[in-house]
Image: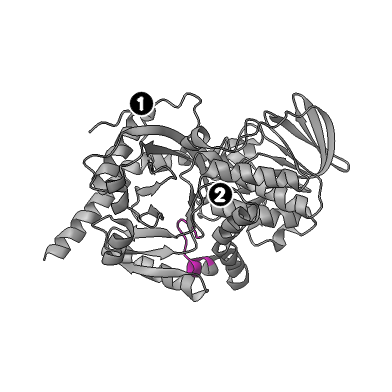
Amino acid sequence: MSAMTRPNGNGLSLWHAVSRNHCDRLTLQGGLDVDLAIVGAGFSGLSTALHAAEKGLSVAVLEAECIAWGATGRNAGFVVPNFAKRDPDDIVAKLGTERGERLIDFAAGSADLVFGLIKRHRIECDALQNGWIQPTHTTAASEKTKSRAEQWARRGRPAVALDSRAVTELTGIRGYVGGWMDKSGGVLNPVEFARGLADAAERAGARIFERTRVTSIDRLPDGWALKAATGTVRAGKVLVATNAYGDALNPVLALTYVPLTVFQIATEPLPRDLRARLLPGGQGVGDTRRNLFTCRFDGQNRLISGGMHIIGAGAERRVPQAIWRRLARHLDLADLPPIAYSWTGVAAIEPDFLPRLIDLGPDMIAGFGCNGRGIAMTTAMGKALADWASGADAHDLPLPSAPPSPIPLHGVVRYAPNVMLAWSILRDRMEGASHNATKAK
């Protein structure tokens, strides 16, 4: 088997290479006055721009590179309407019934919002809302996902627990103990979705500028001034929507999350006979291992999977090969096609694994930390932030809101996920071996 990688050339992702909808936007020139200025043209920035413009606000989006240049265009394209590490009852225990249930409702409807926007604005992005599946690798994990599915189902969501047979039938992957599925989840091409949001925002009246890097944000008596090399925007309110890609603009924000670099690969298209066996319904899969295993197909039958890396030299070459080998092993594909594309992205991980709004001063806010659930969560975050831009108090929004709270010993903690990966892989193997030994008795 060969896992040779085709160079991407521009350093971006599969999605940038294959996306059909592409329209270069102008660079900001001169001065502009608006109600709302948004820094960053990813999902949260573009969704906010669309929903705010639809409310009648004047909006300018300032993007340092191109639309979907950051994590928005570098993920796997999963639309997942739940939390990576927290379950509903746990969130209620942490935040209280009123605030907890509001955050849960926010997440629960996030995938429906995404696919609703796609339908309403006729965005062509290979969208498929056939569900998101989380298989379990041990009996203990299976019991936890049964409870997880029950908690979401109790709140009216289309969540169902799965036994081993159901997982195999849905995925074509053998060896899982069980799992669960949220039927409202799905997959899409994230770059085409983002560009579709941009088109819709512009039709609603928003203005979007590419290659316009904001160098400073200064307080004025009646708002803010955002300066770039070629112009200035004066705004009543400002949204910093850079997620993990805006450290230079606001170093304080960089201390509030752990940056997690994730590698993704896409194979050459699978032959029809192999494709028919795997994920016949087109769902996305992300299992319960600490070293998370994911897979999905894109619209051209390429297999996509991702993973983290242990700190060390040569990761750009070494990690995609390791992901490819793992993909072939888990899917029992002796003839897995070679890697066609490989790329990386950086996610912002919060210590409590919950999304949040960060208050940066009068009429300036940032949305952060969707913890690997970015497409659904940040699109929904944009709808909520449009309410803030229209006059709602940030504390009345469904997401937690507070001033910046730097993580203690951030300089060390930021490397923890990569340093601990080897231990996580070992624990996964030990748990798998223990489960198999128990099953054999």
Horizontally, residue 77 falls left or right of residue 225, namely left
Q: Where does the image place residue 7, in percent across and percent down from the top left? A: 41, 25
Q: Residue furthest front?
A: 272
Q: Where does the image place residue 249, in percent across and percent down from the top left? A: 66, 33
Q: Quadrant of residue 240?
A: top right
Mark 1 falls on what kind of element?
loop
Do we see residue 256 in this rendering? no
* Amino acid type indicated by mark 1: Gly
Horizontally, residue 374 falls left or right of residue 419, namely right
Q: Nearer the viewer, residue 441 or 424?
A: 441
Give the label on residue 345, or none: none
Mark 2 falls on what kind of element?
loop
Q: Earlier in the sequence, mark 1 or mark 2?
A: 1
Q: Residue furthest left?
A: 441
* Amino acid type indicated by mark 2: Gly
Q: Taking 231 as reference, is 254 above or below it?
A: below
Q: Nearer the viewer, residue 277 or 409?
A: 277
Magenta highlight on residue 86: yes
Q: Label 1 belongs to which residue?
A: 314
Q: Residue at x 71, y 63 (%)?
A: 396
Q: Quadrant of residue 24?
A: top right
Q: Residue at x 62, y 32 (%)?
A: 66
Give the label on residue 369, or none: 2
Q: Where does the image place residue 20, in percent across and percent down from the top left? A: 55, 37
Horizontally, residue 387 falls left or right of residue 326, namely right
Give the magenta part as a residue range: 82-91
